[in-house]
Image (cartoon, grey):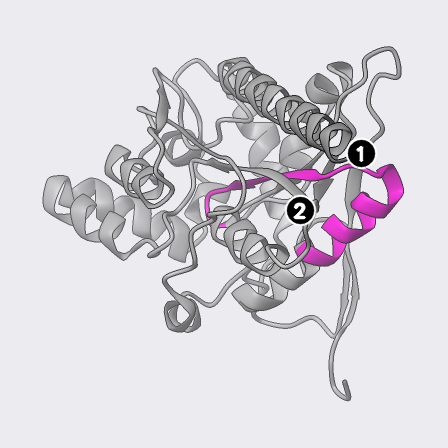
Amino acid sequence: MPGSPEIELEVLGGEGDGSKVQPFTLLLIHGSYHAAWCYEENFLSFFRGQGFHTYALSLRGQGRGKMIPKLPVAGALEEHASDIQAYVHHLRELHGQPVVLLGHSFGGLMVLQAAAALKDSPGALAGLILLCSVPPAGNVGIILRSLFKAPLQALRITWGFVARAFERDAELCRQLFFDADTSAEDVGKYMDLMKEGCPEGTRLLDLRQLQRSLPVEACGHAPVLVLGGDADVIVDKEALEEAAAAHGVEPVVLQGVAHDAMLGARWKMAADAILGWLAHVKARLLALSCCCSFWRKQVV
């Protein structure tokens, strides 16, 4: 399309441990002020070590990808979701497996939008993981609850995002994203990675424009895990319950885990919870495969 920016997306990760065979591929999507680096720290090596082909995608305008010209807003919800959908099809062809999509924070809305488009592609999607994710209706309810419950904290959080103050204030950065046990050294490292991964002057989403795309359709054609932490000051427990109710499941809430559940001292709690859920998805896929095989034999 004339006038469209030149887009090149950063991808990290790769094939899983060849000694362990897994039936699906994982694609991990970040949220605002993050990029694929947030999964490179722990999740990519962990899940690849478990045998899963695992990839993390930096959305357009984020990470080490390329967007020319640079735009004030990297893309609309639908554009990010279209990029995710295209990469799911690429992975499906590359490995011959269905894909489990994981979306963190606002990335959860993007994978829901991508999943809605993928329902017309049988066998493309094996499951969906909403990690500390904004619910399908968006974050307005979260903001209103936080203003009612703790107005000073809500204003501090809002200021932290609007002014990107978490990139300069280590204690604010910890409060927003990390559990209490995360070392000062790690917090400082993650602050630098956020600055690098989300360039100044390029927002991931325009939240006012986003409201016109909400609510996002819930995923009804693949199993869904809703996972979060009780120490998350951005996505509260009510938001997790809302996302879970939309999918007919119960949320999994981890004690002491903050918004960046894939980072910090307690990242493995989230990784183990996801691994346990993936085992159930794997069993479901194997059961369906056995049933199909049985009925084919009966027909023959």
Q: In terms of depth relative to the viewer, which is nearer, 103 or 256?
A: 103
Q: Nearer the viewer, mark 2 or mark 1?
A: 1
Picture residue at 38% right of the left edge, 53% below the top = 136
* Horizontal and vertical percent position of residue 59: 66, 54
The residue that disc 1 covers is 300
Picture residue at 38% right of the left edge, 36% below the top = 176
Q: Amino acid at mark 2?
A: Glu
Choose top left, top right, bottom left or bottom right for residue 279.
top right
Give the vertical position of 27 relative to 227 (above or below): below
Give the vertical position of 221 relative to 282 (above or below): below
Q: Is residue 98 magenta?
A: yes
**Label ID, residue 229:** none
Give the vertical position of 37 relative to 216 (above or below): above
Determine the secondary structure under disc 2: helix
Q: Is residue 32 visible?
A: no
Picture residue at 23% right of the left edge, 52% below the top = 141
* Horizontal and vertical percent position of residue 48: 76, 21
Say if mark 2 contacts mark 1, CB within 8 Å.
Answer: no
Label 2: how many residues lie within 10 Å, few (<14), some (14-19) or many (20+)? some
In this rendering, position of residue 87 left or right of residue 201: right
- Magenta extent: 85-106
Tell which circle, 2 or 1, labels the residue nearer the N-terminal end: 2
The residue that disc 2 covers is 196
**Quadrant for the C terminus in the image:** top right
* Horizontal and vertical percent position of residue 132: 42, 36
In this rendering, position of residue 195 left or right of residue 86: left
Q: In terms of depth relative to the viewer, which is nearer, 63 or 220?
A: 220
**Quadrant for the N terminus in the image:** bottom right
